[in-house]
Amino acid sequence: MSTTTSPKPAERTTRGPGPDAPASAWSTVRMVAGRELTTRLRSRAYVVTTLVMFVAVVVGGVVIHLAQGSSSSTVVGLTPQTASLAQPLEASAQAAGEDIEVEQVADDAAAKKGVEDGSLDAALTGDPASFTVVVKKELDTTGTAVLTSLRQQTALASAVQKLGGNPAQVSQQLSTATLDVTALEPQPERDGAQIVAGYVAGILLFITLQTCAQLVAQGVVEEKSSRVVELLLATVRPWQLMAGKVLGIGVVGLIQVAVVVLGGAGTAAVLGLVDASDIDLGATAAWSLVWFVVGFVMYSLALAALAALVSRQEDIGSVTAPVVMLMIVPYIIGISIAPWNPDSPIVQWLSYIPFCAPLVMPIRIALGTVETWQAIVSVLISLALVPALVWLAGRVYSNAVLRTGARVKLRDALRAA
């Protein structure tokens, strides 16, 4: 007699959401990012670097403020004989944009003594119509122009007086005569603080972008060479590991940039280094942060993918050189041309090209030569490339990060299944 047993019901196992589950995918990315964030923020090198950059920007602003406030006027001594030249001298200096302070001295000997001991920069001695300029060493170009104009005025006044005219009326008419100039394409006025702001924006973004993107590349090779990546990829998908690393280091870099930018903008605002009608410090700082994020995402994805091709730190430079050059070229053009000629065709084109825009457009924004819509268009053009860059970088990273030993060729990483 046979006994028939009914099959046991299949055992139900409870499994947590795997790496493919949408709910856990981004939580895994956040976990990797959090690990990078805490590790980098606790780094003494990071803290010291951030403080040094912050102090450098603040001290630089203070130095500019002191330099602007330390411009002293030129002191010119006049004897009783040349005292009548005070008013025409000041008028000539004002026309030339020179700040001259007149000081009365007792006689020619006192004037020469004042020049010798440095209390006077120059002195006018002798007859008003044919005065002599006394200086310690030499007369600068601006002073020569001002005093030459004064000599011409005194000579003209003497000639007018000999002809029976009124030298005072002639001098007044001459002082009110101005040159009317109509510029068809006027060059916008730009003060030194705006140029400094352009330099600071370009240099700061270049340093932080290069440093943070290189950290991503070095981190990829470090995990690959130590075989840590093999343990991580047992539970984490490659794209999640790469995205978490980029996100974590990106936040670290953004904090650093924000600290330095806010320090520089705050110093400029407190000390009044820039004219609010020429440059909006708040908007400039905000755009600097935006462009850091855009530039970091693009460069870090590219460097992370390329770094996955090698297994040694010594080989990073050989695979990342093209991207580094892509960063250096617009940076050099940006700081050498943009501050002086922000409307140059090459500067304008580079400020819209992805990978170049993050290093050029912030300089133009700091100089106040870009409309808001132009900056937005430039950002959108760069962001349009990001999805394709994410796919390409993810494919290269996924296919190369577990292959140790010899350098993986880029085309092999792209073809690998």
Image (cartoon, rainbow, N blue to C red):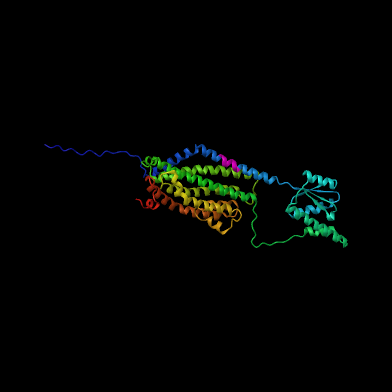
- Name the spot of residue 147 as percent of width and height, x first: 78, 54
Q: Nearer the viewer, residue 363 or 220?
A: 220
- Name the spot of residue 110 as percent of width and height, x first: 83, 45
Image side of residue 203 versus residue 114, left or right:
left
Q: Main secondary structure of the magenta part?
A: helix
- Classify 368 as above or below 62: below
Q: Nearer the viewer, residue 341 or 366?
A: 341
- Name the spot of residue 36 as percent of width and height, x first: 46, 40
Q: Could you tell me which residue is drawn at 40 percent across and 51 percent down?
A: 410
Residue at the left extreme of this rendering: 1
Image side of residue 175 versus residue 231, left or right:
right
Question: Can residue 52 be found in the magenta stretch?
Answer: yes
Q: Could you tell me which residue is drawn at 52 percent across and 49 percent down?
A: 291
Q: Could you tell me which residue is drawn at 50 percent across and 49 percent down?
A: 295
Region rendered in magenta: 51-57
Query: In the rendered view of the protein, which quadrant contains the N terminus?
Result: top left
Question: Can residue 359 be found in the magenta stretch?
Answer: no
Q: Nearer the viewer, residue 66 or 3?
A: 66
- Classify 335 as above or below 184: above
Is residue 385 at all visible to an observer of this figure? Answer: yes
- Name the spot of residue 354 as percent of width and height, x first: 49, 54
In which quarter of the view is residue 265 placed?
top right
Residue at the front extreme of this rendering: 137
Is residue 270 at all visible to an observer of this figure? Answer: no
